[in-house]
């Protein structure tokens, strides 16, 4: 393939091509490519419906009630960010790790322990930005460790091992009182007041969450087109071949865990500030599985999937009691999850893509074009 | 591994254990022996439940995360049958059969239609476990249920050396574990179906190529694996109780057992169960605060040095 | 019919009753909206359902109307997770715009809801049944009121009763989290002060059902075991203890000597006679207010419709808190204006009449109430039941200690080996 064809392939959407299975070959070719793709990428990337969505996201808090902004908007963005880390690992790396919420929880706990909380005896009271940065750093280290433990195991084992690691951390938080304050956890872990703006208020907090979510989203979209991202997808598709080509498969996997760890850590800090608390139940097994449900619900095929899944999940969670008994919320979410896995494994995105295809077949011009191309 | 390193690792693991055992015996021999017995009998229960899990994984590469829910289902059914008829053996049989039937239904209705999609099958089991757990909570309430042990097994066995008295039921747990282990071994090595299962674990494609009805073998395996979980549920319902949350605990125990012992290996499940049962019980007796974390530390250590498990084989 | 269907249908029935009453008694002012939060999912689901029944009973006793205003109950559910509880409360307060909030059920939820209440000064928050000590002792909230006593207050008086029975050395067996800590603290603060000794405390990890290791550690020279486990876990423990050949008497926590334990069919059944326990209610209490409450509960929620044979702890406590909410409304004639200032004053000064005695609030808006010390006895038919040994009134949150010497219960506090 010529250099121009490579560039064209990049601009057309690395994700689609990756699923066609050509990732390992492309990875080898891309490694010799130079710069200049970024500009072409940006101009080719942004489309009208992207701008519409961005405009909606920015205007939303000004006409929605504070409750909807905070409990639906900000919560969905924070959860979506954590689920994005899982989509990166699982959808593009082939490693479904149930420990992403654990990484997020580690960041949250470090924030509480190093910053200010209701437990004056344990919290060190350092400034919020230091606590947050250190929290992200420590969580990323933990994610790297988890990755090192899990990367040498193959696909299915990863789920089991990450569940076990997640539950181990839950019990550590539950039983230890000197550092993690046991069953009660940490209360009063609040977002700071910066430059006179109290970020505990719904609208400022929403914009912080939105900024982080957008940063995470664009970062993941960009990452997937870099040599590292392509190589990662190659490792997903055929690890043995990548190894034969000279790529260090284990290093790529661990690096992916680390990158996903950063994203999950940021999400974890946002979530802790949203709740105003962190407790063992925040990293318990149902919280771990909820992130998986959100990622699968939205669809692991594109980085916007987890955010879609998060919005649906949060809406169900908040308004289920008005529709059916809230008591049966778990039944509802389990059935929805089962339905998605059985009938539309690509989640809502997959449903949307199939719907678009069906609509396309209904248009006579498209059908005519197709018939013409079939000759 | 060279002989030197092998000896080194064995010494590194066995050394501290021997030191601890020596100290504990000197400090309070009765507590030590009682705890050892407790650990071995708990390991028997874990083995019964985990053997089904590893059987299903070994043959079909299906990580059945609904295994815990099958355990709880068997336990509840056993509780209902024991309450209605008063016979423990009937409860055992009912727990086994109902769980086996549900497992069979899962295999035939769902998993058979997605062959080879390991990840997707695992997701389905996660969804099923959520749904099953909530259905059971809805129908049977959040209260705990316990099954009465048969009269001949209830109460203590007295006049034992050193320990003085020990629960008859717990000793019977050990007997049941050994019995089921032996029966499983006979099933796998002496029957046609068992031979097919072992062949399938080694090489699935070849099994298909020899003309064996692979779907039938899969269905039988899933049914037996699920049935074992249900049987474990009834047995566990006597000693521990059946309450929402037990499904997760036993699922995690099964996960740890098969990861430590090796996937797809019945002797591995026995070894893993022994390690987990003894470690958990000693942890509870001598260092209760971090006993659960301690068992997961063992898991992590095994993973770090032997990712396939102690008796595991490559896929 | 399943439990939740009954709850749902009864809610419908209740709503129909309210509608009928409100048609009969036209309200001049808008209805008062009260949010009701209980754990209807997870392990406390049964308790949460009964709590809601207790709260609804308080509303039904007033015919669905208070001070000329119709009462509108909006329900929410949680699962004992503090963040779920805060989310559910936030929805009730900010989306459904309730005036008064009643709930939550469990201890750590209570602390989280209390913190949230500080951000909503225009809504009055009244507790459901959460019994953590820290809720009102540490960083109390000016608009969070708790008309039920906490876990430690529920055990006050049991230490003295244990010493009177001759138990000088007691071993503690309890689950390793906040509620048992408070129960043990309530027992030990008095027991240790009066000369008792607790040589060993065995904290069982949350959810663990295997007590074999704990049983193996029971020393030979203790007189009794203080068992603070839930009723079903206590039966489990008794089974395992009996199977291991144990024979020491038991002292029970507030949720330990429940119907499960009283129906225990093991060989040690007879040795259960004489078991002491303490709590905020006693089934066999013979005061007329209590009997009237039980009869009212049984009439409105017969066993066939999902109620318990006798109201549970959760039903009583939710009833007390909802009754306080409604009595306060009546005292100010439904006036919730000016940031509910008059209403909150009325609540703070109120002397609430409950089926188990009078309740007042201290300066942290925490209840000062009554504790019952009970003992298991056998009746003429051979059934076991809890007889009231003593009734201790005016139990305050500091348990009679000075503020400086009071420490919230934890794994190591209090300690008297």
Image (cartoon, coloured by chain):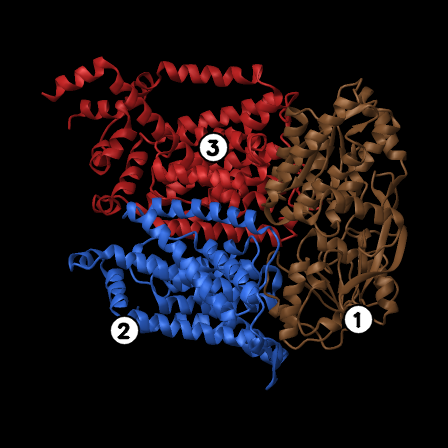
Chain colours: A red, B blue, C brown
Pick the residue in front: C313 or C245.
C313
Q: Nearer the viewer, mark 1 or mark 2?
A: 2
Q: Position of residue C225 (x, y in %)?
A: 74, 68
The residue labelled by disc 3 is A81
| As drawn, A55 above or below A300 | above
The picture quadrant where one finds residue C91 is top right
Kindly identify the residue that appears in the image at 66 percent across and 64 percent down.
C235
Pick the residue in front: A250 or C318.
C318
Q: Is residue B253 visible?
A: yes
Identify the secondary structure beneath mark 2.
helix
- Calculate the distance from the C-alpha at mark 3 to the C-alpha at mark 1: 55 Å
Q: Nearer the viewer, mark 3 or mark 1?
A: 1
Q: Nearer the viewer, mark 3 or mark 2?
A: 2
Q: Is residue A347 left or right of residue C53?
A: left
Q: Is residue A97 left or right of residue C354?
A: left
Work out which residue is located at the far left of the displayed protein and give it. A375
Do badges 1 and 2 share one subunit?
Answer: no
Chain of the residue where label 2 is placed in the rendered structure: B
- Calculate the distance from the C-alpha at mark 3 to the C-alpha at mark 2: 53 Å
Chain of the residue where label 1 is placed in the rendered structure: C
- Calculate the distance from the C-alpha at mark 1 to the C-alpha at mark 2: 59 Å
| As drawn, C342 above or below B296 | above
| As drawn, B107 above or below A64 | below
Q: Is residue B60 left or right of residue C269?
A: left
The residue labelled by disc 2 is B190
Mark 2 crowd level (few <14, some 14–19, many ≥20, 10 Å Cα): few
The picture quadrant where one finds residue C19 is top right
């Amino acid at each position: 393939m010529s250099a121009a064809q490579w560039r064209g392939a990049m601009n057309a959407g690395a994700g689609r091509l990756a699923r066609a299975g050509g990732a390992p070959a492309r990875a080898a070719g891309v490694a010799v490519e130079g710069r200049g793709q970024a500009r072409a990428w940006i101009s080719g990337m942004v489309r009208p419906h992207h701008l519409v969505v961005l405009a909606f996201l920015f205007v939303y808090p000004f006409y929605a009630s504070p409750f909807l902004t905070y409990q639906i908007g900000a919560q969905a963005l924070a959860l979506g960010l954590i689920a994005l880390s899982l989509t990166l690992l699982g959808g593009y790396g082939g490693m479904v790790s149930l420990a992403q919420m654990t990484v997020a929880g580690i960041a949250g706990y470090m924030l509480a322990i190093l910053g200010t909380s209701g437990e004056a005896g344990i919290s060190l009271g350092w400034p919020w930005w230091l606590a947050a940065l250190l929290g992200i750093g420590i969580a990323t280290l933990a994610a790297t460790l988890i990755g090192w433990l899990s990367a040498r195991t193959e696909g299915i084992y990863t789920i089991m091992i990450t569940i076990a690691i997640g539950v181990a951390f839950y019990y550590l938080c539950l039983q230890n009182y000197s550092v993690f304050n046991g069953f009660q956890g940490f209360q009063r872990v609040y977002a700071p007041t910066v430059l006179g703006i109290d970020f505990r208020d719904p609208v400022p907090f929403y914009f912080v969450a939105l900024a982080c979510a957008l940063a995470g989203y664009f970062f993941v979209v960009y990452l997937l087109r870099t040599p590292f991202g392509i190589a990662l997808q190659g490792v997903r598709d055929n690890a043995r071949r990548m190894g034969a080509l000279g790529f260090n498969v284990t290093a790529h996997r661990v690096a992916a865990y680390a990158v996903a760890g950063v994203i999950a850590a940021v999400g974890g800090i946002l979530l802790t500030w949203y709740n105003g608390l962190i407790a063992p139940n925040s990293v318990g097994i149902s919280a771990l599985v909820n992130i998986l449900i959100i990622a699968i619900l939205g669809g692991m095929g594109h980085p916007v999937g987890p955010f879609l899944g998060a919005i649906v999940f949060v809406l169900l969670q908040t308004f289920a009691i008005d529709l059916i008994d809230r008591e049966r919320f778990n039944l509802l979410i389990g059935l929805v999850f089962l339905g998605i896995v059985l009938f539309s494994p690509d989640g809502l995105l997959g449903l949307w893509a199939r719907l678009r295809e069906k609509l396309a077949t209904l248009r006579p011009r498209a059908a005519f074009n197709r018939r013409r191309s079939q000759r | 591994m060279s002989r030197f390193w092998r000896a080194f690792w064995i010494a590194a693991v066995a050394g501290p254990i021997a030191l601890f055992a020596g100290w504990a015996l000197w400090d309070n021999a009765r507590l030590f022996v009682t705890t050892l017995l407790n650990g071995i009998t708990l390991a028997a229960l874990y083995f019964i439940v985990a053997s089904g899990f590893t059987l299903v994984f070994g043959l079909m590469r299906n990580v059945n995360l609904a295994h815990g829910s099958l355990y709880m289902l068997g336990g509840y059914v056993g509780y209902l049958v024991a309450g209605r008829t008063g016979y423990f053996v009937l409860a055992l049989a009912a727990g086994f059969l109902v769980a086996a039937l549900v497992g069979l239904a899962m295999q035939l209705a769902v998993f058979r239609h997605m062959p080879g999609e390991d990840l997707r099958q695992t997701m389905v089991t996660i969804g099923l476990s959520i749904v099953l757990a909530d259905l059971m909570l809805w129908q049977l309430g959040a209260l705990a249920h316990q099954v009465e042990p048969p009269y001949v097994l209830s109460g203590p066995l007295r006049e034992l050396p050193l320990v003085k008295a020990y629960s008859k039921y717990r000793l019977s747990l050990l007997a049941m574990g050994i019995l089921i282990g032996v029966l499983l071994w006979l099933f796998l090595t002496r029957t046609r179906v068992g031979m097919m299962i072992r062949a399938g674990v080694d090489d699935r494609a070849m099994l298909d190529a020899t003309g064996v009805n692979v779907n039938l073998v899969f269905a039988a395996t899933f049914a037996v694996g699920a049935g074992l979980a249900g049987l474990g549920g009834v047995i566990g319902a006597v000693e521990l109780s059946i309450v929402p949350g037990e499904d997760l605990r036993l699922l995690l125990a099964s996960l740890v057992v098969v990861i430590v012992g090796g996937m797809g290996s019945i002797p591995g499940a026995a070894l893993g169960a022994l390690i987990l049962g003894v470690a958990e019980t000693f942890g509870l007796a001598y260092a209760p605060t971090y006993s659960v974390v301690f068992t997961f530390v063992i898991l992590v250590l095994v993973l770090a040095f032997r990712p396939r498990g102690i008796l595991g084989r490559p896929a | 019919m399943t439990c939740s269907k009954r709850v749902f249908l009864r809610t419908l029935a209740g709503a129909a009753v309210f509608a009928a009453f409100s048609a009969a008694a036209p309200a001049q002012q808008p209805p008062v909206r009260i949010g009701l939060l209980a754990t209807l999912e997870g392990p406390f689901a049964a308790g949460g359902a009964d709590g809601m029944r207790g709260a609804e009973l308080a509303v039904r006793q007033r015919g669905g109307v208070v001070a000329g205003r119709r009462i509108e109950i909006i329900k929410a559910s949680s699962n004992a997770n503090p963040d779920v509880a805060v989310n559910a409360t936030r929805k009730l307060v900010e989306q459904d715009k309730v005036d008064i909030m009643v709930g939550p059920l469990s201890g750590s939820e209570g602390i989280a809801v209390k913190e949230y209440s500080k951000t909503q000064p225009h809504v009055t928050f009244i507790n459901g049944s959460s019994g953590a000590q820290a809720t009102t002792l540490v960083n109390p909230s000016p608009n969070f009121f708790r008309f039920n006593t906490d876990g430690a207050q529920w055990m006050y008086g049991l230490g003295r009763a244990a010493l009177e029975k001759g138990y000088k050395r007691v071993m503690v067996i309890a689950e390793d989290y906040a509620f048992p800590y408070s129960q043990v603290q309530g027992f030990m603060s008095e027991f240790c002060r009066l000369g008792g000794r607790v040589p060993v405390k065995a904290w069982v990890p949350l959810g663990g059902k295997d007590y074999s290791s704990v049983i193996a550690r029971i020393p030979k020279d203790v007189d009794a075991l203080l068992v603070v486990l839930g009723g079903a876990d206590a039966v489990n423990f008794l089974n395992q203890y009996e199977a291991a050949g144990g024979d020491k008497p038991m002292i029970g926590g507030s949720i330990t000597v429940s119907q499960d334990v009283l129906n225990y069919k093991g060989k040690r059944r007879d040795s259960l006679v004489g078991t002491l326990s303490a709590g905020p209610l006693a089934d066999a209490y013979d005061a007329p207010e209590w009997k009237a409450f039980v009869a009212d509960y049984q009439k409105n929620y017969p066993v066939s419709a999902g109620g318990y044979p006798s109201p549970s702890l959760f039903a009583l406590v939710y009833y007390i808190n909802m009754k306080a909410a409604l009595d306060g409304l009546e005292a100010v004639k439904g006036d919730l204006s000016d940031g509910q200032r008059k209403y909150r004053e009325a609540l703070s000064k109120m002397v609430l009449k409950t089926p188990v005695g009078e309740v007042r609030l201290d300066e942290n808006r925490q209840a000062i109430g009554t504790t019952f010390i009970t003992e298991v006895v056998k009746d003429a038919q051979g059934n076991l039941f809890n007889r009231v040994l003593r009734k201790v009134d005016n139990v305050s949150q500091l348990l009679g200690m000075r503020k400086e010497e009071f420490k919230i219960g934890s794994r190591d506090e209090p300690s008297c080996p």
